[in-house]
Image (cartoon, rainbow, N blue to C red):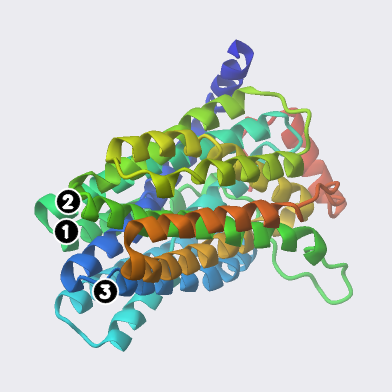
Amino acid sequence: MKAGLRTYGEVLADPAARAFSLAGLVARLPISMTGIGIVLLVSLSTGSFALAGLVTAAVTLTGAVSAPLWGRTIDRVGQAPVLVAAAVVWTVSLAVLVVAVEAGWPLPAVLAAAVGVGLGFSSAGSSVRARWSHRLQGSPRLDTAFAVEAVLDEVIFIVGPVLVTFLATAVDPALALGVAGVVGLVGALALAAQRGTEPPRRPRRTTGAPAERIRVAALAPVVVASVALGVVFGGMEVVVVAFATQAGVLTWAGAILMAWAAGSLVSGVVTGTLTWRRSPAARFRIGSACLAVSLVPLPFVDEPLLVAGLLVLSGMAIAPTLIASVAVTQAAVPQARLTEALGWTSTGLAGGLAAGAAGLGALVDRGGSPLGFWGVVAAGVLLAVAALGVRSRPAPPLGDPVEKAELAGLAAHPTAPTAR
């Protein structure tokens, strides 16, 4: 354990890496605020969880479609211009969405604003992981770097829901989403400004040059499993808000979701200290099965504290599963297409979030939070089944000799500044 913790220290000893990781943390904090913020805004304004789930689904589904397109553009033109453009679209669209809901605009107008929010959804997570992968290619520290980001993801899902729930219930739901918009814009600009740690751009190859292809057979099972994982995440967010509302503890909805993230945070820290003998695909399958089993007791519980306690235990399966999914993806595609590949897994996750939010929102309107929790259990079973299709494959060969030499240098000196 001590040796593992020292590895964290070695990874974070790089000042440039700390800087882009911190900026990425701020840029993607709104990821944990937007969904629950929209659910609170719409449900408190209209009284309908089905409508809240539909609007949330529009945001996440658009984000699912746009993520790989942003990823491909990032790989070709660089991270900075894409991060800035997406952040501007995100901030403006979020402001329009708030106005549309509070002013009672027609549903098509509300959904159009939601589409704009999804279109500008942050690529900071994929961008930061691509920077780590480029900086530590060939180094055993790369798994620890991915663990760092998984832990920070859980910090995001601890801080974000509590913050947005407090602002929405104690002050105003519009203010809660306004804060999310400002935080996301500041973080994206801070990450974009750090040009020196970006992976090199990969422009289109000239005619006749061999293309670096993403093997669909290797990536597709990970994307399908990511969809199932997203259904669990998206559904849980809506159901917990409904549960807290029915239990008379709406102001604690964010804290209940925080418990889920806290369990994942603990397991993420531990995961980063371990040297794994099992393949990433095997770890992904095991983690998915454990997560599915942990959801089964929820429909039988009606005490908020007990639900929070069960979510702490359930959350311990999340971070190892997500870390393994990134490692599987990183090994399955060429380095030059990594951001795009991570975009595709984000697409699967976001598509599942959309389906989970909309579908389980409808279940809640029909049968309350108990039926919603049964929907979460069904989503967990879907995840466990989908994960069976994920298999480990050897990493593809590196590209041209220049890239090989560059990556060899990074492997020998993984904390050295990257030359542009």
Query: Which one is in front, 200 or 111?
Result: 111
Disc 2, disc 1: CB below 8 Å? Answer: yes
Q: Which residue is mark 3?
A: 97
Residue at image point 25% right, 50% down: 244
Q: How many marks?
A: 3
Residue at image point 37% right, 43% down: 301
Q: Which residue is mark 2?
A: 167
Q: Quarter-wise, where is residue 121 in the image?
A: bottom left
**Residue 333 placement (x, y as % from top left):** 76, 55
**Residue 163 placement (x, y as % from top left):** 24, 45
Query: Which one is in front, 341 or 247?
Result: 247
Residue at image point 21% right, 56% down: 176
Q: Assign a secondary structure to mark 1.
A: helix
Q: Assign a secondary structure to mark 2.
A: helix
Query: Which one is in front, 64 or 412?
Result: 64
Closer to the chain start, of discs 2 and 3, is: 3
| Residue 367 vertical position relative to residue 389 in the rendered view, above or below | below
Query: Which one is in front, 417 or 219?
Result: 219
- 135 relative to 317 in the view: left or right: right
Residue at image point 76% right, 36% down: 138
Q: Quadrant of the N terminus?
A: top right
- 104 relative to 150 in the view: left or right: left
Asked if residue 126 can be seen in this view, the reply is: yes
**Residue 23 placement (x, y as % from top left):** 42, 44
- 420 relative to 88 in the view: left or right: right
Q: Gap between marks 3 and 1, in whole Å?
A: 12 Å
Closer to the chain start, of discs 2 and 1, is: 2
The amino acid type of the residue labelled 2 equals Leu
